[in-house]
Structures are given as structure tokens and as C-alpha cells.
Amino acid sequence: APGASGQDAAKGIYFIAVSQFGIAFSFNCIMSFMPFFILRVSAYSESETMLWIGMIMGATSLVAALAAPFWGSLTSRVRPKLLFEGGILCNGVLFFIMGFVENLPLLLALRMIQGALGAISTIGLVLVVASAPKGQLPKFLSLFQNSMTAGQLIGPPLGAYAVALFGYHSPFIIAVIVVFFSLVYCHRYVRDIPLQLKKPEPGKPLSRRILWGWGLTIIGTIHLMFLPSILPHILEGFQLTEQAAITSAGTIMMVYMAAAFAGNYLLVSLAPRMGISRIIAAACLSAAVLQGLLYFSIGVYSFTLIRVLQAGMIAGVIPLVISAFAGEGRGGTTLGFLNSGRFVGNALGPMMAT
């Protein structure tokens, strides 16, 4: 916030990250078991159900990709903190309703509404960029990215174990509780910032650069998010029972998201010495090779090991790309457009996989 000391501003960013962690956790505690849940309640054939899984898991992110630039531009008319809180509240209500729905078209509709109302990580990015002390923006963008990664890390195993212990409806209740506390925490501790007035955009060459950055964000997110929708069938191929497959899916997602968390910090810390472009190129090439090696895995352990290495390599691409443009003083609309690449990747990943 204007006039705040570097230490106070940094403390406010930690509070933003914690609130974003709560949202990411809530989304992902239902993701590890959602394909199993859909398979159980579906009235369609197996091949049709696979398509429903792809649509339901990808719909939120597809709609959020379209909404993200709008949310970014809205920060010039509505206080960013108020938008952030409103998005958190809407997500909590939708999680509660989803816990009692077993009709696939209705579940798809709720996921699409959630996407339209839930592109609030764009607002979180705006809050971070406006609050970060000078010269420390990549560090705090990495923290913000890792807060989401931490939610993706902790959510799946807890959601899977909750299903195993208490049934399929329990993770939705857990998600609502976490969202409630995230809202309270955000309201009490996140610093408010002024309206983010739109800045003039430079000409065509920079617009082309932004499109390349958007594409890199999509690629990195696809690599991170394609797997959950097809894990039931992969684990079935490794001869696991349904109960063992559910808990294994949560554990596998936890382990490779932990690798993404560590890889994010490592790549961001190397960027000042090696250059952002070189780091991004090396990460993408390494992840592509490891993606191919997944085909040759012979069991759960070899599959998990390769996936861990791949996630660790690709995770740092997203904050590096966003920090490159945020450091130029880009406005909320540009940050929203870049962040929309994350949602496009979230949508394309499960749809391409299924």
C-alpha cells in the first residue's frame, strides 16, 4: 500500500498468500476424488462418462480463463480487496451446493458458475504487485505461486482420506470450512490498496511478447494439471482396487506438488544468475523429455518418480513469466490476461488427457 514500509508491505503479502492458499486447498481437496465420484454417480456409459469427467474438471478453469482479464480490469473501478473477498465468499457458497449434487449436467453448470465467479487469483496477483517492495517482485510472486501450489499439495490427500473415512460428501464440507476461515483471515489481515488505474499499453511488439508469455503460462499449467482426471484409469492399469486407487491418487498428487513447490523456489532463485529466458527454456525441454518417459513407467513407483521430476522442472515457468511482465509495471488487465493462461491450462489439461 502507498506509504507502507517495506516490512509492513511484505507482511501484507504473506496474508494474501495465506488467503490464496485456502482457496487453492478447497479447490484441490475435491479434485483427487472427483473422477471417482463422477464414475460412481454417472448414469452414462463409461466412454461418455470419461468425456463428462474432462468437461466437469476443466469447465471451471475454461470459464475462469475468459473471466480473468475482466476481473483484472475491474480493479480500476472496484477496490481489489473487496473483489478478493467477494470471490472467496462466492466460492464457499458453491462448494456447499456442490456437496449435495449427483446430477452431472447440474454439476457441470455449478463448476462453470464457479469459474465465472472464481478467477480471484488475478486479484491476488494485483494485490501482490501493488504491495511488493521495490526489487523483490519475483520473490513475492514466487511466494504467491507457492501458496497455490501448497494448497494443491495438501488438498488432494486430505480430500482422498476424508472420502475413505467419511464418504464422498465430507471433502465439500471441509472445503466450505477452509473457505470461511480464508475469508475471515483476508478481511482482518490483508492490506487494502487503491483502485488500479489503467495504464496505456505499448504498441504491437510488446503485445506479441505478451501472447508468447500467455502461451508459456498455458503450457506450464497443462503439464502440472493434466494428470488427475486420468489417474483412476492409470492406477487401474497398475492393478489397484478402487479404495487403494483413491488414496494412492491423493498421495501421488501430494508428492508431485511438493516437487513443484521445491522446483518453483529453485528456478526462481537461479533466474537472476542464469537469465529468465534460459531457465524457462531448460525447464520446458526437461519437462517435455520427462513427459515422454511417463509412457515407459512399469509401476506406481516408477510413474510417481518420473512425475515428481517433471513437475519440479515445469513449476517455476509460471511465476517467472508473470514476474517478467509485472516488473515492467503492467496494469491489472495485462496481469489478468497472463493469469488467464493458467486457467486455460487448467481446462485444457484434463480435457486433452481424457
Image (spheres, grey):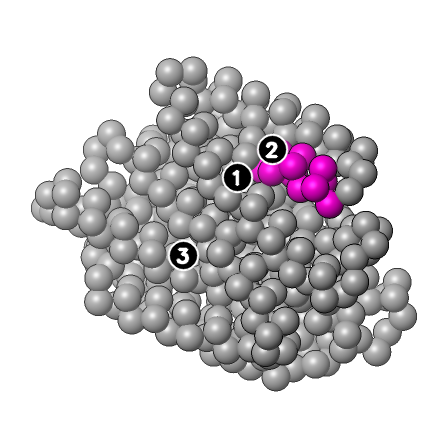
Q: Residue at x 48, y 73 (%)?
A: 174
Q: What is the span of residues highlighted in magenta in the rendered image?
A: 300-311
Looking at the image, which is closer to me, 286 or 330? 286
* Circle number at residue 79: none
Residue situated in front as seen by the camera: 156 or 80? 156
Q: Secondary structure at mark 3?
A: helix
Q: Residue at x 43, y 29 (%)?
A: 266
- For label 1, the residue is 259
Does the image show residue 156?
yes
Residue 309's tag is 2
Image spot of residue 321 (x, y percent):
47, 33
The label nearer to you, 2 versus 3, is 2
Q: CA distance from mark 1 to mark 3?
A: 17 Å
Q: Amino acid at mark 1?
A: Ala
Q: Kindly identify the residue that appears in the image at 49 percent across and 33 percent down.
A: 263
Contact (Cβ within 8 Å) of mark 2 with mark 1: yes
From the image, tell me which residue sits under label 3. Answer: 21
Which image quarter: residue 256? top right
Question: Which picture quadrant has residue 105?
Answer: bottom right
Q: Nearer the viewer, mark 1 or mark 3?
A: 1
Image location of residue 63, percent across then percent down: 59, 60
Q: CA distance from mark 2 to mark 3?
A: 23 Å
Q: Residues within 10 Å of mark 1 (few under 14, many from 20)?
A: many
- Please state which amino acid type lies under the numbered disc 3: Phe
